Amino acid sequence: MATEKKTWRLPVPRSLLGRMLFLTLLVVLLAQALSSVIWLSQLRATQMEGLVTSARSLAYSMAASVSYFRSLPVAYRPLVLDQLRSMGGTRFVVSLNDRPLEMAVLEPTPRKQAVLSAVGEVLREHLGNEPRISAMFVRPEDLRIFNSGLKLDELPRSWAHYALSLEPVNPPVLVTQIELAPGEWLYIASLLPEPYTTLEDQNLPAQQVWFIVLTSGFLLLFIGLLVHWQSRPLKRLARAAREMSLGTVVEPVVEGGGSEVVEVSRAFNAMRERISRYLSERSQLFSAISHDLRTPITRLRLRVELLEDESVQAKFSRDLDELELLVKGALQCVKDTDIHENIEPVDLNHVLHWLIEPYLSPNGNGRVTREGEAASVYLGKPLALKRCMGNLIDNALKYGDRAHLYVEDDAEAFVLHVEDEGPGVPEQRLEQVFEPHFRLAGKQQQGYGLGLGIARNIAHSHGGEVSLQNLREGGLRVTLRLPRIND
């Protein structure tokens, strides 16, 4: 069985404030990262230049020491070394060996290679190409100084520790061995001066990291306050639009915020006035139609009764019944979808129990079953919601004999599935059944064909939706979804 590949998506906040802070954080981090990379590359270039300069200065001192020892008679060289060791505090650790000492060399890095190249270049410049020269970096614990292979810790502290110890850094030691004569090698061990002792590429200093964190934090704080201040009029506008969609009386939105938000609020207020005027005029119009049509229909029925020809009388009566059915259907459609109620908490569990109680039986074989419950109350119009869910249940009982209710509820939406055991609806007619007075062929039960349309209109007024789906095992599933909108 093939498995679907899950694609990873960057989680993006849904609110304007969250998205603004998210994008600002990305821009700040990108800008700080770019500036830090440039600054760090410049810092490393400057440090490399200073490191090479320090290495060349150190090599000049080594060349001077080599020249000094060369000028001494061979017998005096050990005496001078003893005097240097007894004094202590010298920049180098110097010894004379009969062969070059073998030690574990550190892994090469660009900085180490630059130092060794600078030291070798200066020494060759001053000493010529004749003497053999060996330069390398060694860890202090691998350092050997005399032919006997003595370690650094085995020597008197005045001999070497002052020059080669830098606790707790423990930096690498530059070891240079130069052949003065056959069987006589001058050994020089030294540390590079500060701040190049570690010879490692420096990362961002802690102060720079804290600077990035603090500046990003303050920037996000101020942008968050700004967006929150500017989004308050939008929240008021959204709340007013939601209340107006539910049919409540909405006061004009206070105009505030930026110029663009002010224009939107002004346009919304104008739209609110036009819609309110239209609804009022429509209500008056249908009230007048209801009053005006009932009188002539009644008058025509009386006149039909006076007709002598029964066939003509039956035709007129049939036409009047059809006319009255259309008028009642139109008036019912307007009445059921234009419910003027206040928004209040509705116990949907109580509403569902009230609707299905007549169809329940003590032995559990009733025409209606129910699974699941609403987690909390829902803010809406009580009578409208009762009529919406009642129409769905009645439709299932009328065309499918039985109704099976399944409730799903969470923080985002309340969902009610109503399944029946009927023949279902042809796929091409799934949307057409919501149209007023539409009825499938062969389904001639009493009614106006308005139940599903009224239910969908009520769901739309609450920001929800009613959808249909044919079940594989037969029957129709009607799904009512009512979103839980947080203020």
Image: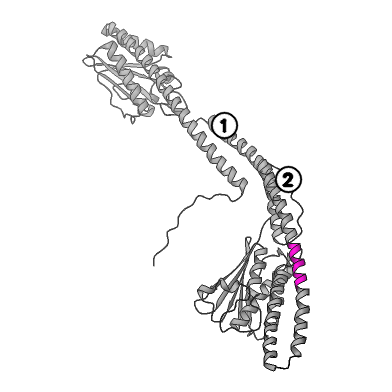
**Residue at x 57%, y 49% (from the top left corner):** 13
Q: Position of residue 229 (x, y in %)?
A: 69, 42
For label 2, the residue is 255
Does the magenta portion include 443?
no
Taking the spot 45% from the left edge, 55% from the top edge, the residue there is 7
- Give x and y (percent) for residue 379: 71, 63
Magenta segment main secondary structure: helix
Residue 123, relative to residue 297: is it above or below? above
Q: Amino acid at mark 1?
A: Phe
Check residue 211 in the rendering and tell me which mark sits there, or answer none: 1
Q: CA distance from mark 2 to mark 1?
A: 40 Å
Q: Amino acid at mark 2?
A: Glu
Residues in magenta, as a range: 279-289
- Position of 193 with respect to 354 (left or right) is left
From the image, which quarter does the C terminus lie in? Answer: bottom right
Q: Is residue 457 visible?
A: yes
Q: Quadrant of residue 162?
A: top left
The residue depicted at 43 percent of the width and 28 percent of the height is 41
Q: Residues within 10 Å of mark 2 (few under 14, many from 20)?
A: some
